[in-house]
Amino acid sequence: MPQWTFDSPGRLTFEEVTALNVRVVAGRLAVLASDGPAALDVTEVDGSALVVTQDDDGRLTVAYKDLTWDGILGWLRPGPRRTTLTLTVPRRCPVQVGVVSASAVVAGMEGITALKSVSGEVVLDGVSGEVRAETVSGSVESRELAGDLSFSSVSGDLTVAAGRPRRLRANTVSGRVTADLELEPTGHVSLHSMSGAIVVRLPRDVNADVSAHSTTGRIESAFPELYATTMPGVRSLSGRLGGGMASLSATTMSGAVTLLCGQPAGRRAEEEV
């Protein structure tokens, strides 16, 4: 099995990459979709060397030897381990990205993408397919999401801008969830938080069944069609917008839930052009 070690900047190209697994500690990481050859560009290495391996099936691994995928969320070792690297791989290539405090950008991928972060910030740009993101305190920002996104965190925030998800699931303890969405006809959004606020903006002409519940948190809506009820121990908001079809549910213990009304979907698409 081919193996390379990077203790200084360098570049590699690969004839074929069928899957990618990259794990780094600190620094910056970019994983970019490409229709051309796969490549690795390392522009900074401080501390331990990175080890690059590729098995006979084309699976590429870029990592430190003692930083495993399963143990990354609890990983803590002394000494500097900072690197800056960019990987370009086929857009339908399955990707696993693990960072401790490094910032990461994943752009254009269309396959299965799995992310783990301790405190590093992750940006998903134009990513579709199936995305699973897990953080401790790291934030995840998604731009032009299409497909499925599952997010779980302790205190990390989730931001979804211009999203058209098929499925969006978010679970946080104290993290904030902010989502600007255009729901597909069969789209399903389920947002849960203990104390973090949930803010969702939907187009004025959305077709969705909506329900929001909180034990002690405030619930506000810009859609007069939704019906609010308050009883001891629970506050709720529910109803059908347009013809229904898609669904949105938001649940908190003490966090506030806010539903905002945006431009009609067609109007916003014209403005983006």
Image (cartoon, rainbow, N blue to C red):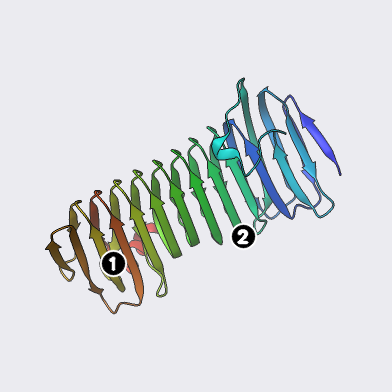
What element does badge 2 sit on? loop
Task: Kindly indicate the quadrant of the structure image that contains residue 174.
Answer: top left
Task: Identify the disc placed on residue 264.
Answer: 1
> Which amino acid is tagged 1?
Pro
Task: Identify the disc placed on residue 111.
Answer: 2
Taking the image as drawn, is residue 222 in sight? no
| Quadrant, the C terminus | bottom left
Which of 66 and 12 lies nearest the eye of the viewer? 66
Look at 76% across and 38% down and name the residue there: 52
> Which amino acid is tagged 2?
Gly
Q: Position of residue 15 (x, y in %)?
A: 81, 50
21 in relation to 131, above or below = above
Q: Position of residue 250 (x, y in %)?
A: 30, 60
Which residue of the protein is positioned furthest toward the bottom in this rendering? 243
Look at 41% across and 55% down and name the residue there: 170
Look at 74% across and 55% down and name the residue there: 18
Which of 122 and 118 lies nearest the eye of the viewer? 118
Q: Position of residue 158 (x, y in %)?
A: 40, 48
Look at 48% across and 43% down and name the residue there: 135
**Which numbered mark, 1 or 2, is in the foreground of this view?**
2
> Would residue 232 be found to the left or right of residue 102 on screen?
left
Which of 103 and 263 lies nearest the eye of the viewer? 103
Mark 1 Cα within 10 Å, few/some/many (few <14, many 20+)? some
